[in-house]
Image (tube, grey):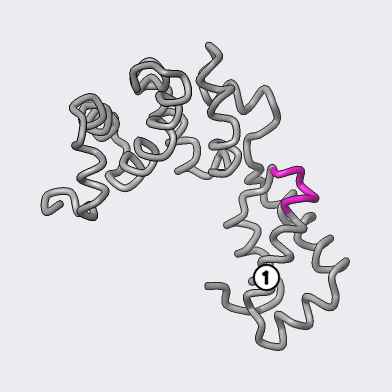
Amino acid sequence: VAELGLARQVAVDLTAEREVADYFEALLAAGISTKLAANWTREEALRLAADKGTAITEAAPIAKMAALIRLVDESKVARVVAKGESDALFACDEEPEAYFTSRGMIQETDSAALDEWVAAVVADNAAVVEQIQGGNVKAIGRLVGAAMKLSGGKADPKAVKAAIAAKLGVEAD
């Protein structure tokens, strides 16, 4: 708790079993941040192990998990997509980047493509744009959702939100 800044319950969860603690520490050694290593160990690795009835390192090999976490952390794959595909990813022999690339799930970071999607959703959603410019900045989420749908889930939601805010001249939180 003191050394890594983890919440007490998170630390308890991660140290309840030696295998889980070793897994978490191996992710840290692989360069994954404390928070991400803790979350992915608790949420995905343990779930995969329970679902498969196997050891955590067998269900979710450390190197593969670290590579997956990096893709999400670098905004190459949306977290929701990564979690939704984790069963299939860990059941196959492909590395995470190859897996998501071959299925067209790598997020688009090209500014020209983002600009096109943003322009289209702004043009098609005048009422939402009015709400945002009228002070309801939370309504940006609706435009982000529309852009994500338009992009087929390939757009980076953070980049889309920033681009929409810039286009509309508002501050997004």
Toward which corner of the image does residue 31 lie, by quadrant? top left
The residue identified by callout 1 is 140
Relative to 36, 94 lies left or right: right
Residue 159 percent coordinates (x, y):
60, 56
Seen as rendered, the residue at the extreme right is: 124
Q: Which residue lies furthest to the bottom in this view?
A: 134
Viewer-nearest residue: 98 or 141: 141
Q: Which residue is drawn at 46% across and 19% down?
A: 52
* Residue 129 pos. (x, y %): 77, 77
Q: Name the residue rendered at 29%, 31% in the picture.
A: 27
Residue in the foreground of this view, choosing between 24 and 46: 46
In the rendered structure, the answer to whether residue 154 lies left or right of residue 27 reads right
User: At x 52% / y 24%, what residue is drawn?
Assistant: 96
In percent of width and height, residue 168 lies at 71, 76
User: Where is residue 53, by image quadrant?
Assistant: top left
For the image, the number of numbered tags is 1
Residue for point 66% across, 82% down: 136
Mark 1: secondary structure: helix
Assess whether residue 134 is covered by the magenta stretch: no
Vertical relation: 140 (above or below) 147: below
Kind of residue sitting beneath label 1: Ile
Question: Which region shows up in magenta?
Answer: 148-153
Q: Is residue 165 left or right of residue 10?
A: right
| Farthest left residue in view | 2
Mark 1 crowd level (few <14, some 14–19, many ≥20, 10 Å Cα)? many
x and y, in percent, of residue 41 in the image:
35, 35
Q: Nearer the viewer, residue 80 or 104?
A: 80
